[in-house]
Image (cartoon, coloured by chain):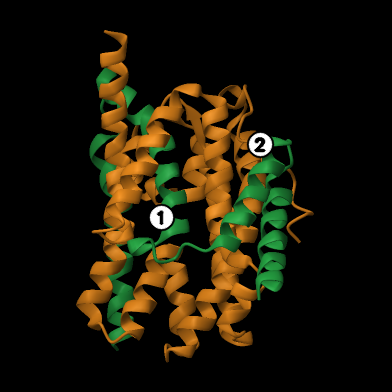
Chain colours: A orange, B green
Amino acid sequence: MLVSVPRMDTQLPDRGEAMPRDRFHAGLRAGAGLAAAAFLMAISFGAISQARGWGSVAPVVCSLVVFSGSAQFALAGTLGAGGGVVAAVVAAALVNVRYVPMGIAVARDLRGGPLRRAVEGQAVVDGSWAAAHLGGGRFDRAFLFGATAVQWPAWVAGTALGVVVAPDPSLVHRLGLDVLTPGLFLILLLDEVRRDRAGRLPAALGGAVAGALLFVLPTGPALIGAAAAALLALRTTREAVR
Amino acid sequence: MIVWTAIGTVAVLGFALKGVGPALLGGRELAPRTRSLLAQLAPALLAGFVVVAVAGRDWAAVDGTVLGGLAVALGLRLGRAPLPVALVGAVVATALLRVVTG
């Protein structure tokens, strides 16, 4: 299934000048690869949450309304460990805090009043956000929508399949499917720094800061630290210029 | 009931976290320094995603077979392989390494 997906190209030089419909379709094509990975991960979420007594409907509704793999795994993991509602919600919210800087970054490329922009901002998910980055802090709005539009149903459908089939969670590990998430981000990072050499310093600092913070903080705040590293990179670059 | 309460709360919080930036900052012309900062955000966060996904809390999730799979993905992409091919390569390499290392 993965091989049949068209090539994901995040480096189209004229992407910003193409028609919105064409950019949306380009986003759909790029999102197909992301959706395939999301579908497989969602099977795992459906199986795990169902095995922890969520029933058949709640995991699917969760994927429908939360639509954040890392937050959903945090939610299921914390509830499954007997952490209670507050602890589970805090864990999931901490994981999702990264959407604040991501939303700020994409804000000026969205349209309409505050409410419409807030709704359009729901299209921000990790893979789509990275793939829609045009460089220089600008984002391709239609491409972002297309990339997310294909991932959302894939995420929900994968969850439903996981609930119905309920494969052994260890199967994901045996088949090596757990490499999909870091693999996807690694490739997007590679494409990003190859497209713009200026991204190498913030990438190095972001990775280093996140890695250090993982010793003392959960993954969500560690990612906020990675985002803050962009500030450090900006400062370092300016001092080097002086 | 506990599950439904948690799902509902996380959904509302998620909407707010994703929406607050676009709602408050979308209509403004940002200062050049802010625009420069936002340009640095994508590579910094992407690198953070990679490290977090590989290492996990306390670096307890580091797995040599995953690192091997990532190396294969990196090699394939540097060789201009399409994204799905690079990802399939990573999955196959990781699974094979697990078979070999038992």
Instruction: Give the residue drawn at x 24%, y 83%.
Output: A84
Residue A94 spot, x, y in % from top left: 27, 60
- A114 relative position to B98: left or right: left
Quarter of the view holding residue A172: bottom right
Q: Nearer the viewer, residue A192 or B56?
A: B56
Residue A29 spot, x, y in % from top left: 67, 46
Q: Find disc 2 in the rendering and name its residue.
A: A9
Instruction: Give the residue drawn at x 27%, y 45%.
Output: A225
SS assignment at label 1: helix
Q: Residues within 10 Å of mark 2 (few under 14, many from 20)?
A: some
Residue B41 spot, x, y in % from top left: 36, 35
Q: Find disc 1 in the rendering and name its residue.
A: B52
The answer to whether residue B7 is above or below residue A105 is: below
Quarter of the view holding residue A12: top right
Marks 2 & 1 on one chain: no
Q: The residue marked by circle 2 belongs to what chain? A: A
Q: Nearer the viewer, residue A49 or A104?
A: A49
- A95 relative position to B83: left or right: left
SS assignment at label 2: loop
Q: Is residue A98 visible?
A: no
Q: Is residue A15 visible?
A: yes
Q: Amino acid at mark 2?
A: Asp
Q: Nearer the viewer, residue A212 or B50?
A: A212
Instruction: Give the residue drawn at x 23%, y 68%.
Output: A90
The N terminus of chain A: image quadrant: bottom right
Of badges 2 and 1, the one in the foreground is: 1
- A53 relative position to A228: left or right: right
Residue A128: which numbered mark, if any? Answer: none
Q: The residue marked by circle 1 belongs to what chain? A: B
Q: Residues within 10 Å of mark 1 (few under 14, many from 20)?
A: many
